């Protein structure tokens, strides 16, 4: 089976009612990024940071996968496919995709604030001050905050290097290092970029641009790939 790599961003989750992380007013869900999504914010006011992510977790748990998620899951029947997502929700998994790598962490997990290898599945549960890991340290959201390293980047690069088909959906490709992943794509791979602002965001001439939202664009592309 042909190897497909899909890179998804906030645009696909937005169609399930989840707000994108970067609104047009420069705020992140009405919060300044530096107040809720940095190590400095965690040190200054951990209770506020926890509450912010507790609300995001609740919101994500109530959201439902949309048809774009289901169409990507459908591709598993026909291709060897892996989804690399910048999103921290679990909508891909709930739609049926079995091979999903989260670059920026997962809302449904918590981890030790001292030992990043201690990760716990919490689903939709809250994290409170006083919730500790097995080593006695405060739990924090399993999220890659701005300014932190993205440990999964090195693990996903080989998937892009050996991809035969690459699909980029709902991301402006403005956040590094995720934006650099397209530089590893082989020159002979078939590449597609689905985004309402595709013509503005993508300058790589190797990509076929589909200037539509995720649901409509993915439906058209999946049907094309399956029927070819």
Image: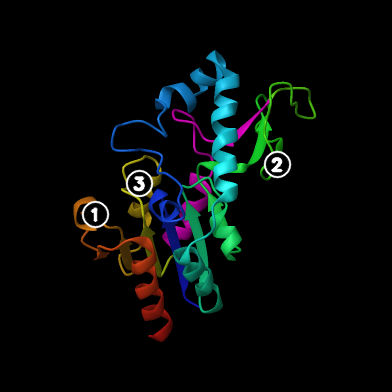
State the separation of the CA atoms marked 3 and 1: 16 Å
- Above or below — where is 101 with respect to 222? above
Badge 1 crowding class, 10 Å Cα cut-off, few under 14, some 14 to 19, many 20 or more, is some
State the separation of the CA atoms marked 2 and 3: 29 Å
Choose the circle earlier in sequence order: 3 or 1.
3
Q: Are marks 1 and 2 in contact (CB under 8 Å)?
A: no
Q: Mark 1 points at which residue?
A: 197
Q: Name the residue under label 3.
A: 179
Residue 110 placement: quadrant: top right
- Above or below — where is 123 with respect to 198? above
What's drawn in magenta, residue-wise? Answer: 139-161
Query: Is 172 displayed left or right of 20 in the figure?
Result: left
Q: In what quadrant of the picture does the C terminus appear? A: bottom left
Query: From the viewer's perspective, is the residue at label 3 or at label 1 nearer?
Result: 1
Badge 2 crowding class, 10 Å Cα cut-off, few under 14, some 14 to 19, many 20 or more, is some
- Find residue 22 and report its horizontal and vertical position in percent: 36, 38
Residue drawn at the location 52% of the way across and 22% of the way down: 39
Q: Mark 2 points at which residue?
A: 122
Local SS, label 1: loop
- Above or below — where is 69 with respect to 182? below
User: How many marks do you count on the picture?
Assistant: 3
Residue drawn at the location 42% of the way across and 23% of the way down: 34
- Above or below — where is 124 with respect to 46? below
Query: Is 79 displayed left or right of 212 in the figure?
Result: right
Is 158 covered by the magenta stretch? yes
- Find residue 142 and report its horizontal and vertical position in percent: 60, 36
Residue drawn at the location 52% of the way across and 35% of the way down: 144
Badge 3 crowding class, 10 Å Cα cut-off, few under 14, some 14 to 19, many 20 or more, is few
């Amino acid at each position: 089976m042909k190897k497909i790599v899909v890179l998804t961003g906030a645009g696909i989750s937005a169609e399930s009612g989840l707000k994108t992380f970067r609104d047009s007013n420069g705020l992140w869900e009405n919060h300044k990024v530096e107040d809720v999504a940095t190590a400095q914010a965690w040190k200054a006011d951990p209770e506020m940071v926890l509450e912010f992510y507790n609300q995001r977790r609740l919101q994500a748990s109530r959201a439902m996968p949309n048809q774009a998620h289901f169409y990507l899951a459908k591709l598993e029947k026909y291709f060897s496919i892996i989804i690399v997502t910048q999103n921290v929700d679990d909508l891909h998994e709930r739609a049926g995709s079995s091979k999903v790598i989260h670059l920026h962490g997962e809302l449904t997990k918590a981890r030790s604030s001292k030992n990043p290898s201690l990760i716990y599945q919490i689903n939709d549960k809250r994290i409170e001050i006083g919730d500790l890991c097995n080593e006695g340290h405060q739990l924090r959201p399993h999220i890659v905050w701005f300014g932190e390293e993205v440990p999964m980047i090195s693990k996903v690069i080989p998937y892009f290097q050996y991809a035969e088909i690459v699909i980029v959906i709902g991301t402006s490709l403005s956040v590094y290092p995720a934006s650099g992943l397209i530089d590893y794509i082989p020159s002979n791979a078939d590449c597609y970029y689905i985004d309402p602002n595709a013509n503005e965001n993508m300058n790589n001439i190797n990509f076929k641009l589909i200037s539509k939202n995720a649901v409509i664009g993915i439906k058209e592309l999946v049907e094309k790939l399956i029927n070819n």
